Amino acid sequence: MKAFVLAGGEGTRLRPYTYTNPKPMLLVGGKPIVQYVLEHLKESGVKEAILTVGYLHEKISAYFGDGKKFGMKISYAIEKEALGTAGSILAAKERPNEPFFVVMGDAIMDFDLKSMAEMHKQSGAIATVALLKHKTKLHYGVAEIDGKYISAFQEKPELEHYINTGVYILSPEIFEHIKNKEDFAKNVFPRLLSAGKKICAFKVDDGVWVDIGRLEEYEKLKDGKEINRLLNLTEIK
């Protein structure tokens, strides 16, 4: 399988680090975030990756080159302007003719992508989305209302839901449903559901997914110790 790795964002919430480096190239435990992503894809059987790049893209291509030293074939789709998560894959010179991964280049993951690919194959869905169970604790008491009367109180309840990890498997048909400058979650997936298309849910019950989206999160993770622990590694590769 092939994979699109989305690595074109400016990472404004991670400034000042991203003034001189694109977000996917920020170091965690001595190597770029996106390198963790590519290594996991390779371990999962992905042999070719197309990196969609934009902001400071020269630093990414200079580091990874054609991918040979990383044991993969790597090419680049360069965005001259922000195109959105879905719009960015339209810039690829060649479109896959079989199901392919789309993953974010700034979130470290370690879960069973092979099982996800098998689920997609068996489902017949146009898309499969990896979902992670997440709990959100509210800081307020919640009242349940039945008509004009209160029927129950919950004091600072914890809500449980599945969140989108930004890890997708898509069938080639997806290109017929993408418009320029669109996002998958905001535009494409809602349109597919409205049209009666099936989107399969792959629940990540076991595994690791770490979104490094904010400055305080990066500060905690950049030395690599926590990622090392989460990935059960004896040393950072």
Image: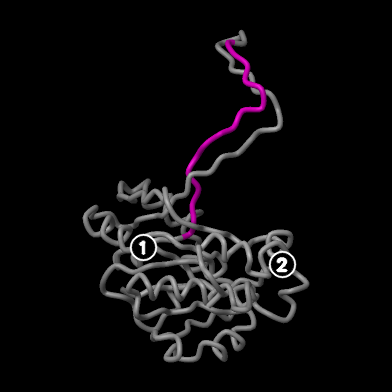
Nearer-the-camera pick, 159 or 194: 159
Mark closest to the chain's N terminus, 1 or 2: 2
Q: Is residue 152 magenta?
A: yes
Q: Main secondary structure of the magenta part?
A: strand
Q: Secondary structure at mark 1?
A: helix
How far from the left and from the top, in percent, is residue 15? 75, 70
How far from the left and from the top, in percent, is residue 38? 46, 75
How far from the left and from the top, in percent, is residue 20? 73, 81
- Labelled disc at residue 113: 1
Amino acid identity at mark 1: Leu
How far from the left and from the top, in percent, is residue 61? 54, 88
Between label 1 and label 2, give the one nearer the viewer.
1
Q: Residue furthest front?
A: 234
Relative height, residue 73 to residue 224 (above, below): below
Relative height, residue 132 to residue 218 (above, below): above
Residue segment shown in magenta: 151-166
- Give the Cα distance between marks 1 and 2: 28 Å
Q: Is residue 225 magenta?
A: no
Relative height, residue 43 to residue 122 (above, below): below
Q: Residue at x 35, y 67 (%)?
A: 175
Q: Residue furthest right?
A: 16
Nearer-the-camera pick, 146 or 68: 68
Left or right relative to 205: residue 105: right
How is this picture coloured?
A: one colour
- Labelled disc at residue 14: 2
Amino acid identity at mark 2: Leu
Q: Secondary structure at mark 2?
A: helix
Left or right relative to 199: residue 70: right
Nearer-the-camera pick, 199 or 227: 227
Q: Residues within 10 Å of mark 1 (few under 14, many from 20)?
A: many
Relative height, residue 223 to residue 200 (above, below): below
- Total labels: the figure holds 2
